[in-house]
Image (cartoon, coloured by chain):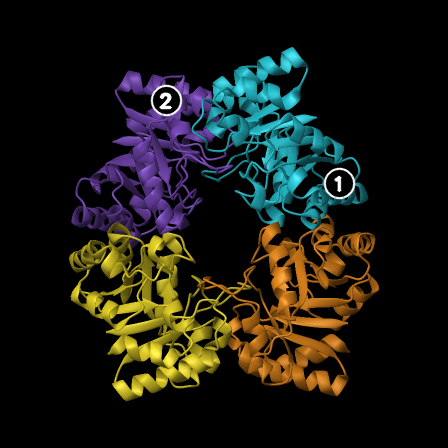
Chain colours: A cyan, B orange, C yellow, D purple
Amino acid sequence: MFILINLKAYPCDPVEIAQAADTVTTEHDADIAIAPQAAHIQRVADTGIETWAQHVSPVEHGSHTGSTLAEAPADAGATGTLLNHSENRRTLAEIDASLDAADRAGLSTVVCANNPEQIAAATSLGPDAVAVEPPELIGTGTPVSQADPDIVRDAVTAVERVDPEVDVYCGAGISTGEDVTSAKELGADGVLLASGVAKADDPKAALESLIE
Amino acid sequence: MFILINLKAYPCDPVEIAQAADTVTTEHDADIAIAPQAAHIQRVADTGIETWAQHVSPVEHGSHTGSTLAEAPADAGATGTLLNHSENRRTLAEIDASLDAADRAGLSTVVCANNPEQIAAATSLGPDAVAVEPPELIGTGTPVSQADPDIVRDAVTAVERVDPEVDVYCGAGISTGEDVTSAKELGADGVLLASGVAKADDPKAALESLIE
Amino acid sequence: MFILINLKAYPCDPVEIAQAADTVTTEHDADIAIAPQAAHIQRVADTGIETWAQHVSPVEHGSHTGSTLAEAPADAGATGTLLNHSENRRTLAEIDASLDAADRAGLSTVVCANNPEQIAAATSLGPDAVAVEPPELIGTGTPVSQADPDIVRDAVTAVERVDPEVDVYCGAGISTGEDVTSAKELGADGVLLASGVAKADDPKAALESLIE
Amino acid sequence: MFILINLKAYPCDPVEIAQAADTVTTEHDADIAIAPQAAHIQRVADTGIETWAQHVSPVEHGSHTGSTLAEAPADAGATGTLLNHSENRRTLAEIDASLDAADRAGLSTVVCANNPEQIAAATSLGPDAVAVEPPELIGTGTPVSQADPDIVRDAVTAVERVDPEVDVYCGAGISTGEDVTSAKELGADGVLLASGVAKADDPKAALESLIE
C-alpha cells in the first residue's frame, strides 16, 4: 500500500515529518511519500523521502507568473504530484493539461475526485492513479472505508472498467492502521492522509501505527 | 441532426435570429435551438424556438449572487443548457453538479470538451450529449470535420465505449450545409454553431444553407 | 434611502416580490430596486419596478459563452448592477472592466467589499456606489450597523476621502426599519437586503416595515 | 532603483541567474532581487541574492492543498512577494488577505495593476509597493516609460495622493539601462523585468546593462 502524506498548509515542520517518514520507510520497508508546500520540496526531498507536489499547473514554459511549472518541483526533487484535490479544483481541460505537464517533467500523478462518476471521468484522462475523497469526510477522522465503503468499491469498479492500469487510492478520514487495512480490503492500492500525520504530536509514531 | 446556435455575447439581435430559426424550423422540419444570453432567454423563448442556456451554475437554491440557478432559465423558457464551453471552463466537480442542477430543472445538457479523452471523461458524468470542439478551430471558419476528422471519429468511438446513449455533437468551424453533412457522416448527432449564424447579414439564409 | 433587494438564487417568486415592491414604492414614495437572476430580469422589469443585475461580466461583445454581457440585462430592462458581491468575487482588473461595461450599457453600479480598505480601493475605480458588507454578517440577521457600526463609519470616511460623489450602501444583516434608520444615521445612502425580503412569507409587509 | 527580475515559468537556470545577479549586486552596489518558481526559492536564496515569491495565497495555516502559504517561501529564504501579477490576477478580497499573509510572514509586497485607477485601488490596501504594468506592453520589448509615459506619471500621482509611503515600480517592456533611467525620471522607485534577463544569453551582461 502506497501512503501519501499531504501536508497542505498545516503548521508543521515538513523536514521533521520527512525524516520520520524516511526512517519508517527504511525500518518497515514501507512505501510512504510526503507532499509539502512547493517551497519546501527541496528540503523535504533532501531527506531522502519520496516527495510529491500538491499541484502542478497546466502550463508549458513561458509567461505564467505564480504558476507551478511541473519542471520546478521535479528539479527540486519531487517525483509525483497530486492534481485536482478538493481544496484545489481544476477544470477538466486543466486536469488534462496538468497530466501532460507532469508526464513531461517525469512526475507520477494522482487525480482526486469526489465520487465514482468523477473517478471514471478522471481515469479517462490517463493518470497513474486516482483518489476518491468524498469532500464531506475530509478532516473528519471518519475513514471513507467505514463511513461509505460502497463509494470506494464503486470507484474501484469504475476504474477497472475504464482503465485497469490506473491505481485507486482512498482518501478522507484515514488515520489508523485499521483504516489502511480496510482500504486495502476494499480494493485500494494506496491511501491519502493529511492531518492524521501532519498534526500528530509524534509523526513517527503516527506513521508506524499506519503500517502495522 | 440537431443544430444549436450559440449567440455568445455577439452584437446580434437575438429575437430576429430566433424568429428566423423558428421559421426555418417550421418550413423545413429542422431541429434548431438558440442559446442566447441568460437575460435574453425570455424573449427568445417567447418566439416559440427551442431555447438553451449557455451555462448553468452548479448550485442549489440559496445564497449564490450572480450565479445562473438552473431553474431561472427553465422558468424563462429554456429547455437545455451548454456546459463547460471552451470559453467557460468549469471544474470536474462543477460540471458534475451543474448536470445535477440541469436535471433538477428539467434541462437537457451538452458538455463541451477539447479532445476524445476529455469527451470520454465528460460522458462518464452522464450528460444527454457531449460536444467536441477543439479550441484552436473555434471561430476559424474551418470545420473540425474537415480540419481534423479523426478527432470527431475518436470522440464518437470514445462515447460509444463509455455510454452509447449519449449523443455526440460536433462544434468549431461549422458554417455550411456541407459541414453539417460531413459531421453527420463522421457519426455526429448534431452540430454547434455560433458566428456563422449570429454574425450573418441574413440569419435566415444562413440557417437555410445549413439544412439543405 | 435606496433599498436594493438581492434575490440571489433564493426559492422565491421574483415577479410577486417585484409587484409588492412596485406597490410599496408607489404608495410610500420609496426608492426600491430588485436584483433577480439574469433570466428573470425581463419579467421583473415588466412589473415597472427598478431592476438590477446581480453581476455583469468584464467583457465587450464577442466570444464569451456563458458571460453576462452588460447590454443583455440592460435590454431586458435592468438599470443597475451589483459587482463583486461577496458570493461573486472578481479580480481588481475585472471589477474595473465590469464598471466600464456597465457604463457602456447605461447601468448604475455598486461595488461590494468587506472592509474600509477594500471600500477605498473600490471607490478609486469610480463606481456610482460602494456597499460595505462584512462577509461574517451576511445572512445572520444581525445588522452591520449594530454589530460593527465603526466599519460603516470608517467606510463612509474612506469614501469621502477618495471620492465624495460615490454613494455608500450598507449591507449584511439588515432586516428592519430600525436597521435602515441606523444605517442612515451612520452616513449610508442606501441598504442592501436579501433574505429579509426574499424569504419573507409576506414580502409586501417586509418591505413596508423597512421604510416606516 | 530596485530591480526585480521575475523568472515566471521561463526555461532558464534560476541558480545561474541568481549567481549573476548576486555578483552584479556586489560589484555595482545595485539593488536586485530574483523571483523564481516557488520550488526554486530555496536554491536561489542559497546563492545570497535577495529572493522573492511570484505569489502568495490569501490563506492562513490550514487545509489549503496546492496553495502557497506565505510562510513557506519565507522559510525557504524569500523576503518579498509579487501579488496580482497580470498573469495571476486575484480578487480584491484575496489581494487584501494576501497582503495580510505576507505581513504575517515578514515578506515585502508589491501589488501589480494595469492603470492608474487600479494602482490607486491597490495602494489603498497598504502594500509596500505597487507596480504599473499595462498588459498590452508586457513582453513586447517596448518600455512603458516610452510607449505611455503618462500612465507612469499618473500612477505616481495616484499613489502620492493615496499613500506617499508606498513605492511605485514600473513594469512591462523594460530591457535596457536607458529604460531604467526613464522610469526613474518619471518618478518610479524600481522596475520589474522578466524576459530581458531570464531569456538573455548572458544574464550577467543583461543585468549590468540595466544598472549602467
- Circle 2 packing at 10 Å, graded few (<14), some (14-19), many (20+), is many
Chain of the residue that carries numbered disc 2 in the rendered image: D
C6 displayed left or right of B87: left
Q: Chain of mark 1?
A: A
Residue C79: x %, y % from top left: 36, 76
Residue type beneath disc 1: Val
Please say whether residue D201 is visible from this viewpoint.
no
Of badges 2 and 1, the one in the foreground is 1
Q: Circle 2 sits on which residue?
A: D21
Q: Amino acid at mark 2?
A: Ala
Q: Which mark is residue A156?
A: 1
Q: Residue at x 67, y 81 (%)?
A: B205
Residue toward you, D161 or C145: C145
Residue D32 in the image, given as x and y percentages of width and height = 32, 26
- Residue B119's place in the image compared with D88, above or below, is below
Check if mark 2 and mark 1 are on a common chain.
Answer: no
Asked where in the image residue D59 lies, by quadrant, the reply is: top left
